[in-house]
Image (tube, grey):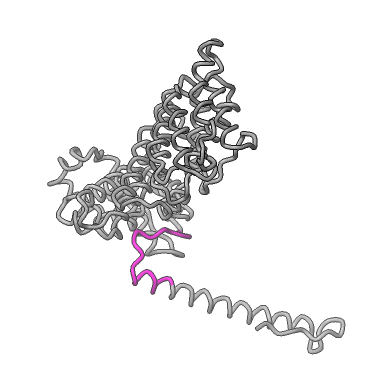
Amino acid sequence: MPTAKGDSIALYSEGTFDEHIQELANYLARNKTEEDRTLFIKPFVEALIPREDSTPFEEDPGRRREVLEMVLERMNGVGEGTEKEIEGFFNLLMAYTLDSYPDPATPIGKLLNSILTAQRPPSIKYRLLSNVFNALPQASPLRPKTFLLILNLASKNDELDVLHLHKAEVDKWLEEWDITVEERAQFCKEIADALFKASQPAKAYPYLILRAQILPSNSPNANSSVMDALISGLRLSSIYNFEPIIGLQNINLVREHPLFKLLKIFLRSGMKEWQEWVATNEAELTSCGLDRTSVEKKIRLVTLTELATANIGKTITYAEIASTIQVTEAEVENWVIQAIRAKLIVGKLDQTTRTFAVVRSTTRQFTPGDWEALDDRLEKWKATLVDILSVVSAARKKATGPTGAAGITPVAAS
C-alpha cells in the first residue's frame, strides 16, 4: 500500500533507454502471432535507429517522449505477463515517464487508466497503483489523485482494510502535497465517505473534523463541513468529547442552528435543558438523521459524568444520581455501569449503602475552573504525601534507635 516516500522498487534489469524500450515493446507483443509481432515491433525499431547529428536518447527528453508515447498508445490493460513481469513493466515505464515529462499528468493518467481497466484481480491493481503513488514526488498533486483511485477500488471491493490507513500518515501527506485547501478538504471527505460506506463511522469521524479544520470561513463548503462533523459526533455512540467541534474556527457559522444549542447542552448543561430543547426541536433530529433515544442516552451519560467530576474522591447517593439524570433509583446501577463501560467514570457501587464512590471521571469541557480544581487536588495530594513521609520517618527513627540498626545512621526522608 502507499507509503510516505516516493521509493518504489524497480524490478527491471539495467540497460540503456533503447534496450528498455525494446523490452517494453516485446512485452506488449508477446501474445501476438509472429507476423503481427513483427509489425507491432517495427515502428519501435525504426524510432530507435540513431538519427544523423541527433543527441542520444539519454540526453534528449523530447526524443524519449516521442518513443514513450508510442508505448502508451499501444498499451491495452496491463499485458499478459506474470504479476512480477507486469510490475516490472509498469515500474520501468513509470520511471522513464517521470524522467522525461516536465508535467507527467497526461501519461500517468494513461498508465492509471490501463491499470484500472485491466482484467486482473484487485491485488495486482493495488500493487501497481501503490507503486505509482510511491514513485511520484512527495509534493506531486498526482499523489492524492492516485490514492483516491486506490481508495475507490478498495471501497468498491469492500476491502478498505487492505489500505492500513492511518490519520497521522494522511496528516503528513496533506502537509506535503502541492494542492489547494479545497482539494485537501475534499480528500478528507472522500476518505470519510469510503469509511462510512464500509460501516466504519468512528474511523470516518476524525476526517470530518480534519476537513472542517482545513477549510477557511470564506469557503463555500465551510458551513456544511462543520455541520457534517457535528451531526456525526452527535450520532456516534462512542463520542462524548465535543471539544474538537466547539473548538473549530468556523463553529460560529452554525451558531444559529438548533444543533449548535444541542452541542452547548452536551458541553455545559443537563437533562432539564435537553428536555426543553427537544420539546421544540425534535423534528430537527429527524431531519439530520439523529435518533432521539440515542442522543438522550448520551446526554444522560455526560450529565452523570459531570456529577462524578464534581465528586472525585467522594461518594454519591443513588438518590442524587437518580435526581440528576432523571431516572428511578432502580435504574441508577445500570446507568453507572454504562458510564463505566464507556470509560467516562471509574468507581465502585455499594448496594448496601446505595452509593457510588467516585475514583476518576472524564471532563466534558476543560475550563479554567477545571484547571483550578485540578491544581487544588494536586496540592492536597502533595500535602498528604508529605504527612505520610513524616510519619514513616518518625516510625523508622523510633524502630532503629538513635544510631540506627547495625551501627548505620538512617537517612531522613526529604
Residue under the image location 46 percent in, 60 percent down: 360
Residue 273 visible in the shown view:
no
Q: Nearer the viewer, residue 365 or 272?
A: 365
Q: Nearer the viewer, residue 313 or 379?
A: 379
Q: Is residue 206 above or below residue 383?
A: above
Q: Nearer the viewer, residue 69 or 5?
A: 69
Q: Is residue 404 above or below residue 2?
A: below
- In the displayed image of the protein, which residue is found farthest to the left? 280
Q: Name the side, left or right, on which 20 lies relative to 144.
A: right
Q: Name the side, left or right, on which 307 lies relative to 312.
A: left
Q: Is residue 231 above or below residue 381?
A: above
Q: Name the side, left or right, on which 125 lies relative to 198.
A: right
- In the displayed image of the protein, which residue is found farthest to the bottom? 402
Q: Which contiguous range is marked in magenta?
A: 358-374
**Where residue 8 sits in the image (x, y, percent)?**
56, 41
**Where residue 161 sits in the image (x, y, percent)?**
48, 35
